[in-house]
Image: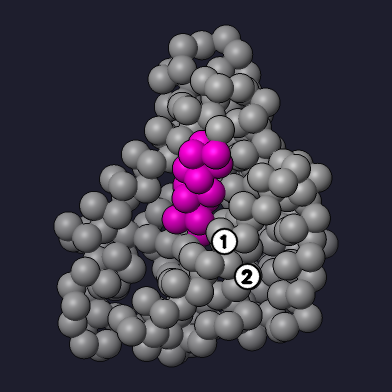
Amino acid sequence: MGFKDLLGFFTRLPVKGVSFDRAADSSYLLPFVGVFIGVVFGGVGYVGFSYFSSWVAGILTVISIFLVTGILHVDGLSDFMDAVFAKVDVETAREIMKDPNVGIGGVLSIFIVLLTGLVAIEALGSYSPLILFQAAVVSELSAKFSMSTILAYGQSPYEGSGNRFIKGFDKKDFAFVFVISLLLGFVVGGWRGLLVLIGPLIGLLFIRLGKNTIGGVNGDVMGGSNETSRFATLLLWGMLL
């Protein structure tokens, strides 16, 4: 039941009867959400690179990611980077993150992440559509591993959706995510599946940035970590070819 709620919360699938509280209490299932998303966009990439030119296939693959997940996490990355690059006090930083306008920090971060993702996907898919499929699944495991790290070790400075997820996640949940992410990563990608460990490293980085910028972590910090971890994992996999 909780997995369905997580799918409804973290994807654009038309899932009925989604409960926010059930989703928050089932966050230990995030690796399986990652596998689902990875299989979808990895499948699009596999078909795309098998039948179309590499750049067309790459663009279609990137688009498929956001058709499945929406732009909530990208928006979170943009808001958070606006605050990070502003280098202001905590209260002002929080106000910046609430501003609906996108600043230069947000624009730059989105550009870098999307460009990195497109280049990495194009390189992986051109090398082997199957390799891209494997990398897609592992990258989503990494992304959800990063979010789980923030849930386990981050502290929210105020009430909000992020705080509710943090309260519903404990160290036992993190231990489960740690083991299942490594296991699934290895099954899917062999030794390269260990790249799922990029996720928690980036998660810890975003915890530090969040603490220094807004006094803790929130949903935007988690979303930014998710996007960064996905594309960083794809890029590093491509560098290992």
Viewport quadrant of the C terminus: top right
Label 2 is placed on what type of residue? Ser
Is any atom of residue 213 visible in this view? yes
| Left or right for 152, reference 66 | right
* Residue 173 or residue 232, whichever sits in front: 232
Magenta includes 146? no
| Left or right for 92, reference 145 | left
Above or below residue 50? Residue 137 is: below
Label 1 is placed on what type of residue? Gly
Circle 1 crowding by C-alpha within 10 Å: few under 14, some 14–19, many from 20: many
Alpha-carbon distance for marks 2 and 1? 9 Å
Above or below residue 233? Residue 57 is: above
Place residue 17 in its image quadrant: bottom right
- Pointers 2 and 1 in contact (CB under 8 A)? yes
Per the rendered image, the range of residues in magenta is 226-240
Residue found at x 61% / y 22%: 128
Residue found at x 46% / y 17%: 54
| Left or right for 213, reference 76 | left
SS at mark 1 in the image = helix
* Residue 180 or residue 98, whichever sits in front: 180
SS at mark 2 in the image = helix
Q: Position of residue 58 (x, y in %)?
A: 46, 26
* Residue 12, label in figure: none
Q: Position of residue 62 (x, y in %)?
A: 47, 34
Chief secondary structure of the magenta portion: helix
Residue found at x 62% / y 52%: 195
Q: Which residue is mark 2?
A: 148
Residue found at x 62% / y 39%: 135
| Left or right for 84, reference 151 | left
Magenta includes 227? yes
Mark sitting earlier along the chain (2/1): 2
Q: Which residue is mark 1?
A: 199
